[in-house]
């Protein structure tokens, strides 16, 4: 058992994510968290008798690290939902995933298998076909290689996170475009530079 809460929750065998409310993302087998019965998808409701449903994962982490009891007592409620999707005639599931630890549904196409299964933008994805998903890239092996997906999700867990991630990726794309433009501008000057120095 750790001697303090400085590395809570990882030191106790679990990770959390999400923006008000926050959820348990993963639980390490054989850990203190696993032995206490915590499961991925549990929503954090209370920490040390304080309501934390309006706190982000970082806010809860900060609160736990200041708590006098080791580990802090927590109250959780299970919020997981299982969705089964079958590829449509075009070979698609009709959704886009985004993020890396945790992973969220970014877009769901209307009348798609994902839409018919009840999935929405902002759903947090915990597992696909029994495998824990830590990054949106992890999902590619399933979306390309399987005709059926069994997804474990937390409905609506990441509306704010999806918006932040989408804005972040959009900003990164703009920055890459600016860098690429600058690179090609420099490349076009290289022959002039070479001639100028007489090489």
Image: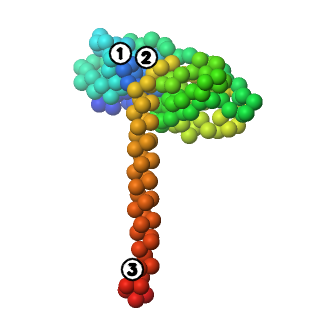
Residue pointed to by mark 2: 43
Colour theme: rainbow
Q: Say whether residue 3 is visible.
A: no
The vertical placement of 95 against 188, above or below, is above
On screen, residue 153 versus residue 71, left or right, reads: right
Vertical side of 15 occupied by 187: above or below? below
Q: Residue at x 68, y 38 (%)?
A: 144
Residue named by callout 1: 53
Location of the C terminus (image quadrant):
bottom left
Classed neighbour count for the residue bearing mark 2: other residues with Cα under 10 Å, few (<14), some (14–19), many (≥20): many
Q: In this picture, is 143 found above or below 45?
A: below
C-alpha gap between disc 2 and disc 1: 8 Å
What secondary structure is marked by label 1? loop
Query: Disc 3 on helix, strand or loop?
Result: helix
Residues 35 and 64: in front is 64
The local secondary structure at tag 2 comes to strand
Q: Quadrant of residue 113?
A: top right
Foreground: 39 or 160? 160
N-term-proximal mark, 3 vs 1: 1
Q: CA distance from mark 3 to mark 1?
A: 61 Å
Q: Residue at x 24, y 20 (%)?
A: 68
In three-dimensional space, the C-alpha distance between marks 3 and 2, rounded to whole angstroms, equals 61 Å
User: Dividing the picture into quarters, in which one does residue 146 lie?
Assistant: top right
User: Who comes first in sequence, dot 2 or dot 1?
Assistant: 2
Can residue 25 be seen by looking at this rendering?
yes
Name the residue that disc number 3 marks.
193
């Amino acid at each position: 058992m750790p001697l303090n809460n400085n590395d809570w929750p990882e030191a106790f065998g679990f990770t959390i994510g999400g923006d008000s409310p926050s959820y348990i993302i993963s639980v390490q087998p054989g850990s203190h968290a696993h032995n206490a019965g915590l499961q991925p998808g549990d929503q954090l409701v209370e920490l040390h008798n304080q309501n934390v449903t309006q706190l982000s994962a970082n806010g809860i982490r900060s609160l736990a690290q200041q708590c006098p009891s080791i580990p802090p007592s927590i109250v959780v409620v299970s919020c997981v939902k299982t969705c089964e999707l079958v590829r449509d005639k075009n070979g698609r599931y009709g959704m886009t995933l985004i993020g890396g630890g945790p992973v969220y549904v970014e877009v769901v196409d209307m009348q798609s298998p994902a839409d018919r299964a009840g999935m929405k933008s902002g759903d947090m994805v915990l597992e696909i076909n029994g495998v824990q998903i830590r990054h949106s890239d992890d999902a590619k092996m399933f979306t390309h290689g399987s005709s059926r997906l069994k997804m474990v999700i937390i409905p609506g867990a990441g509306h704010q996170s999806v918006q932040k991630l989408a804005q972040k990726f959009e900003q990164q794309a703009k920055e890459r475009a600016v860098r690429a433009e600058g690179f090609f501008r420099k490349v076009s000057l290289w022959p002039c530079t070479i001639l100028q120095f007489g090489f």
